[in-house]
Image (spheres, rainbow, N blue to C red):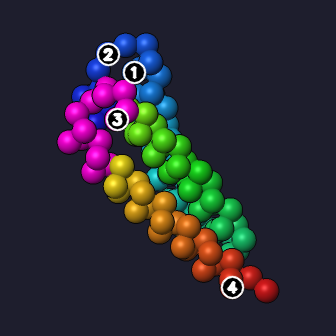
Amino acid sequence: MTKQISKGHASEILKKQILRSSISVALNYSESKEAESVKDLIHKWKIALKELRETHTNLRIIEKLELCDSVMSRPLLKETDELIRIFVSSVKKLRSRIP
């Protein structure tokens, strides 16, 4: 999608930011697989969740400013929203396991 974003100063900033935040989600999730405890796992997932929310916000801005075709951004917004819901639910379930 970032290849489809129109050129311009604001576009370049958003493009770089969305790449950073979305990549960070994957990296934090990957790191969580080696969590040392449930608390550590929750911490890593909460970081990934923050990055997911940032990605979602950047996607909404890109869509509102019409910097790329909504055919490209809408499915990504939907998928990001679904991932946010999954992470929120997972963190809640894990928190309930901590005495």
User: For mark 2, what is the residue?
Assistant: 7
Residue beneath disc 4: 97
Tell me which numbered mark, 4 or 1, is placed earlier along the sequence.
1
Q: Which residues are magenta?
A: 63-76
Of labels 2 and 3, the one closer to you = 3
Q: Amino acid at mark 4?
A: Arg
Residue 66: say if magenta. Answer: yes
Res 43 → quadrant: bottom right
Camera-near label (1 vs 3) is 3
Q: Which residue is mark 1?
A: 11
Mark 2 vs 3: CB contact within 8 A: no
Q: Badges 4 and 1: C-beta atoms under 8 Å apart?
A: no
Q: Is residue 43 above or below residue 80?
A: below
Type of the residue with mark 1: Ser
Residue at 41 percent across and 28 percent down: it is 15
SS assignment for the magenta stretch, majority: helix
Q: Earlier in the sequence, mark 2 or mark 3?
A: 2
Separation of residues labelled 3 and 4 (CA atoms):
39 Å
Q: 41 left or right of 13?
A: right
Q: Secondary structure at mark 2?
A: loop
Mark found first going from the N terminus, 1 or 3:
1
Amino acid found under the numbered disc labelled 2: Lys
What residue is pinned by disc 3?
A: 63
